[in-house]
Image (tube, grey):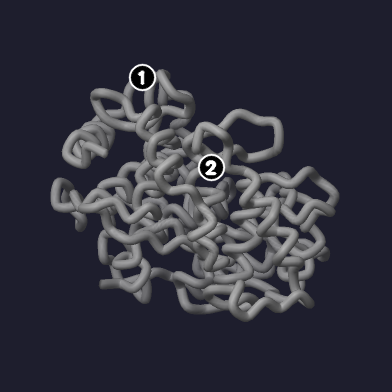
């Protein structure tokens, strides 16, 4: 992997996104997370101004009025972009609050990456209001005005609480029960109960259980079958590596760069990384490496931020020389996760 070339690619994306990303402006914080975390993994965070990044991210936090009630159904997290950020009315009342769980996860992750002290974030109202998003079945909506509920947002809630070191925003037992209800007959996890097993859903399930403390590191050495069916899960996950060395997200689907993280991280959390054919995976990833930097979804295509980021995380899991180690369950580097 050409680390210097990828660092230049990520730096260019930091300063100016290509025009096709205009339609993704609503996800501006998420795009920033991909770029800034990429630079960190590539050991190139010195190319950007960290204090300026922290101030920019903090500008997206929702600050309720002085009489805000955390039980009023609102969620006081982070907006995903300027287009979803509206000023309060003349009386200081926030009429249009579009803060989102995924944007809040990305915001806190970026702040940890750049070394910002999260104790300075107004987390009390954030976590108290986050409980408004948890549903009776333990799942989470991403935004207070409605939306789909699935494992993605359970993961975001768990990661937010873990990074803030405060679990008051989640009923962990309800969340655990919801996750367990998502394990399918074949061992993988669907995004919702009864859905087809999926690589991303399986990652969200296992990473959430790990963050909440329901499963330990290296689960295979202390297999507790009363919580999840680990042998069946492991069989499903291992079968996702294709003949070309890449990973697929579901059976009978094409291998894809991003699943080298979604599946590879699950194996890492389970303590089963030795079940991966690392040489074959590396060969596949290199076929998706673009000559000017970044990674594509499939071999021979143009790169994009999403697959570039998960290409970098995959090489970190493969312990590529010159890259920082990854905290698999948080999706950021170990140094950022530990606040080093």
Q: Earlier in the sequence, mark 2 or mark 1?
A: 1
Q: Which residue is mark 1?
A: 19
Give the residue displayed 72% in from the left and 49% down from the top. 191
- Can residue 121 be seen at all in this image of the molecule? yes
Q: Along the line of sight, which residue is nearer the eye, 290 or 32?
A: 290
Mark 1 is surrounded, within 10 Å at the Cα level, by few (under 14), some (14 to 19) or many (20 or more) other residues, namely few
Q: Is residue 218 above or below residue 22?
A: below
The C terminus - image quarter = bottom left
Q: Which residue is mark 2?
A: 259
192 vs 215, left or right, is right
Contact (Cβ within 8 Å) of mark 2 with mark 1: no
Residue 255 percent across, percent down from the top left: 56, 32
Label 2: state its secondary structure.
helix
Residue 146 percent across, percent down from the top left: 72, 47
Between marks 2 and 1, how big is the CA–CA gap?
26 Å
Q: Is residue 30 above or below residue 112?
A: above
Label 1: state its secondary structure.
helix
Q: Is residue 109 above or below residue 222?
A: above
Mark 2 is surrounded, within 10 Å at the Cα level, by few (under 14), some (14 to 19) or many (20 or more) other residues, namely many
Q: Along the line of sight, which residue is nearer the eye, 85 or 279?
A: 279
Give the residue displayed 68% in from the left and 75% down from the top. 172
Give the residue displayed 38% in from the left and 27% down from the top. 287
Q: Which mark is residue 150?
A: none
The N terminus - image quarter = top left
Give the residue displayed 58% in from the left and 71% down from the top. 210
174 vs 28, left or right, is right
Instruction: Tell me which corner region of the image, top left, top right, bottom left or bottom right, holds residue 157.
Output: bottom right
């Amino acid at each position: 992997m050409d680390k210097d070339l990828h660092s230049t690619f990520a730096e260019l994306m930091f300063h100016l996104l290509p025009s096709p990303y205009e339609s993704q402006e609503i996800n501006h914080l998420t795009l920033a997370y991909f770029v800034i975390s990429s630079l960190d993994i590539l050991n190139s965070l010195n190319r950007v101004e960290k204090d300026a990044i922290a101030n920019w991210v903090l500008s997206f936090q929702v600050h309720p009025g002085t009489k805000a009630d955390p039980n009023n159904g609102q969620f006081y997290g982070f907006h995903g972009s300027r287009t979803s950020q509206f000023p309060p009315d003349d009386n200081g009342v926030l009429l249009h609050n579009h803060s989102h769980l995924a944007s809040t996860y990305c915001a806190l992750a970026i702040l940890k990456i750049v070394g910002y002290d999260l104790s300075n974030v107004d987390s009390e109202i954030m976590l108290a209001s986050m409980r408004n998003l948890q549903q009776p079945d333990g799942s989470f909506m991403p935004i207070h005005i409605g939306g789909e509920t699935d494992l993605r947002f359970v993961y975001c809630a768990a990661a937010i609480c873990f990074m803030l070191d405060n679990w008051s925003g989640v009923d962990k037992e309800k969340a655990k029960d919801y996750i367990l209800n998502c394990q399918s007959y074949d061992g993988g996890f669907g995004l919702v109960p009864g859905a087809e097993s999926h690589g991303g859903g399986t990652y969200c399930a296992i990473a959430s259980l790990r963050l909440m403390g329901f499963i330990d590191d290296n689960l295979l050495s202390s297999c507790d079958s009363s919580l999840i069916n680990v042998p069946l899960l492991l069989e499903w996950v291992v079968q996702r590596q294709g003949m070309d060395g890449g990973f697929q997200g579901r059976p009978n689907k094409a291998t894809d760069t991003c699943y080298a993280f979604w599946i590879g991280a699950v194996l890492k959390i389970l303590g089963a990384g030795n079940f991966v054919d690392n040489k074959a995976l590396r060969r596949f990833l290199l076929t998706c490496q673009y000559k000017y930097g970044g990674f594509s979804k499939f071999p021979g295509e143009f790169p994009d931020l999403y697959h570039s980021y998960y290409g970098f995380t995959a090489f970190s899991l493969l312990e590529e020389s010159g890259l920082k180690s990854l905290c698999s369950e948080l999706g950021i580097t170990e140094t950022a996760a530990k606040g080093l």
